[in-house]
Image (cartoon, helix red, strand yellow):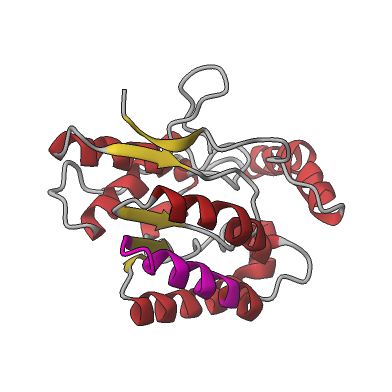
Amino acid sequence: MNDHISGDRYRGWADRLAERLAADAPELRYANLAVRGRLIRQILDEQVPQAEELAPDLISLCAGGNDILRPGGDPDAIAGLLDTAVGRLRGTGARVMVFTGFDLRQVPVMRLVHQKIAIYNLHIHDIARRHGCTLVDLWAMGVLRDRRAWSDDRLHLSADGHRRIALRAAEALGLAAEEDWREPYPPLVPAVWTEARKEDLRWARTFLGPWINRRLHGRSSGDGLNAKRPDLTPLG
């Protein structure tokens, strides 16, 4: 996440959505169990039991993308674990909101897994239908194909990307719109070819190389991190 507040704190789409919900329900309590880089098996084994114990009214689950990006990621097997997770969460009686993967064909490294993401998304649509979940189709959000929706690493959302997803999620929940997530970005001045290639090389050295190295060695940028809001507490 790259919606930075201060220090090591980030204000992601889930935080923004919680703020929107709290505007209508000041008594709202909010937990955020997400940890950057977690795989679907870790989410099923660690975060799903935590969510079951908290017994909230609404649960959002955006999972599987990190598995898809890893070498050998099998969208069918990943979807099977997601199906289990969703079934358990729905078993609590909570409303569950699930998210598809992004359409990131504009990012060179993502083209290698574009078809796997599409297959995984088909599963997510089916899982949402069978379990009666609210679905947020991130793949269909064409505005997110603009580079300004993404941070410098081209893999995590920018502040505005988080803002737009929070708006889309609020829309899926039937909340009154505050802004239009579909609003297009202003036109960009086309980059000079040589400057664009220099930027691509800088990105590859700074972000892509370390990212590939972590994946090959089974490591994550989220190793050692914990959930920032493990308990249901009021916002503020």
- Residue 148 placement, left or right of 163: right
Magenta stretch: residue 157 in it? no
Residue with the most extreme top position? 7
Q: Along the horizontal axis of the image, is 25 left or right of 200?
A: left
Kindly identify the residue that appears in the image at 45 percent across and 51 percent down.
Answer: 53
In the image, taking residue 59 as reference, residue 197 lies left or right, namely right
Please give the name of the residue rendered at 33% of the width and 46% of the height, measured from the top-left corner. Answer: 166
Q: Quadrant of residue 141?
A: bottom left
- Of 101 and 191, nearer the camera is 101
Magenta stretch secondary structure, dominant: helix
Residue furthest front in the image: 53
Label tally: 0
Highlighted range, magenta: 80-95
Which residue is located at x 15 percent, y 47 percent? 177
Front one among 131 and 156: 131
- Asked if residue 34 shows in the view, the reply is yes
Q: Residue furthest right?
A: 217
Picture layout, residue 88 above or below residue 149? below
Q: Is residue 88 magenta?
A: yes
Q: Position of residue 126 (x, y in %)?
A: 42, 81
Up-down: is 23 above or below 68?
above
State whether residue 186 appears in this view.
no
Q: Quadrant of residue 87?
A: bottom left
**Where's residue 17, x and y in %?**
31, 42
Quadrant of the image occupied by residue 76: bottom right
Q: Nearer the viewer, residue 189 or 14?
A: 14
Tell me residue 71's x, y (percent). 78, 66
Residue at 43% from the left image edge and 78% from the top image edge: 127
**Looking at the rendering, in which quadrant would you find the C terminus?**
top left
